[in-house]
Image (cartoon, rainbow, N blue to C red):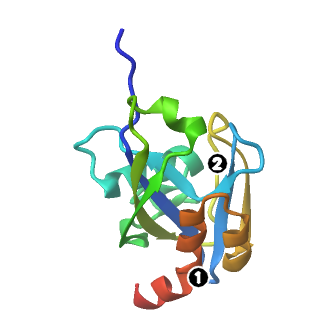
């Protein structure tokens, strides 16, 4: 059977509140690695926006455009920041991609949520979550592109 490889195109979704508190989640496969929601496209045809909606639901249980309840937000709460990063895939994770693939294109989104939103982690992917003021959250992110996106929050919120 042919192995299934990840598509080297992904999303980064910074989940935040109006007070600029940021949700970070700790990776299950790398203790101490804190990040925002991330994930690769499931198919080449899947749009980055749809990837962001799917990944947020899978990793946090937050439903973008879902029924109004404790874990749903309106579709327009998810904003495409029209920012993409090209970065080198960490060697520890390169086996997930086709041989020779070393770069990933990451599309950045912001998701404004109420502070009291229910967060339900996928234990297969993440083991803990924390809300932090945006500057502290940026310092805690292991990924430089994630930290930079978090630091853009005051500007992004002003133009949303």
Q: Earlier in the sequence, mark 2 or mark 1?
A: 1
* Residue 75 or residue 123, whichever sits in front: 123
Q: Is residue 35 left or right of residue 44?
A: right
Residue 35 placed where, x, y %? Answer: 63, 57
Q: Is residue 106 above or below residue 19?
A: above
Give residue 54's mark: none
Question: Which residue is located at x 59 percent, y 78 percent?
Answer: 151
Q: Which image quadrant for residue 153?
A: bottom right
For the residue labelled by badge 1, is the local secondary structure a helix, a strand or a loop? loop
| Extreme-right residue of the structure | 32
Tag 2 and tag 1, C-beta contact below 8 Å: no
Name the quarter where the C terminus is drawn: bottom left
Residue 98 rendering spot, x and y as whole percentages: 38, 30
Task: Name the residue that disc number 1 marks.
Answer: 18
**Residue extending farthest top:** 1
Instruction: Determine whether 97 is above or below 40 in the image.
Output: above
Toward the viewer: 142 or 62? 142
Q: Is residue 113 visible?
A: no
Mark 2 → mark 1, Cα distance in angstroms: 21 Å
Give the side of residue 79 with respect to residue 24, left or right. Answer: left
Question: According to the image, label 2 marks what residue?
Answer: 120
Whether residue 128 sits left or right of residue 152 in the image: it is right
Q: Residue placed at 41% from the left, 48% from the top?
A: 103
Q: Is residue 74 visible?
A: yes
Q: Quadrant of the N terminus?
A: top left
């Amino acid at each position: 059977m042919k192995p299934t490889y990840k598509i080297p195109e992904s999303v980064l979704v910074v989940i935040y509140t109006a007070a600029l508190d940021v949700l970070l989640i700790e990776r299950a496969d790398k203790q101490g690695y804190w990040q925002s929601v991330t994930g690769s496209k499931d198919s080449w045809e899947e749009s980055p926006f749809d990837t962001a909606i799917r990944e947020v639901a899978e990793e946090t249980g937050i439903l973008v455009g879902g029924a109004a309840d404790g874990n749903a937000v309106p579709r327009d709460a998810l904003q495409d920041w029209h920012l993409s990063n090209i970065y080198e895939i960490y060697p520890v994770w390169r086996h997930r991609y086709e041989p020779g693939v070393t770069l990933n294109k990451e599309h950045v989104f912001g998701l404004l949520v109420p502070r009291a939103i229910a967060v339900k982690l996928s234990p297969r992917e993440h083991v803990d979550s924390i809300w932090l003021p945006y500057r502290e959250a940026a310092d805690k992110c292991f990924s430089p592109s994630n930290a930079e996106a978090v630091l853009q929050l005051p500007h992004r919120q002003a133009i949303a």
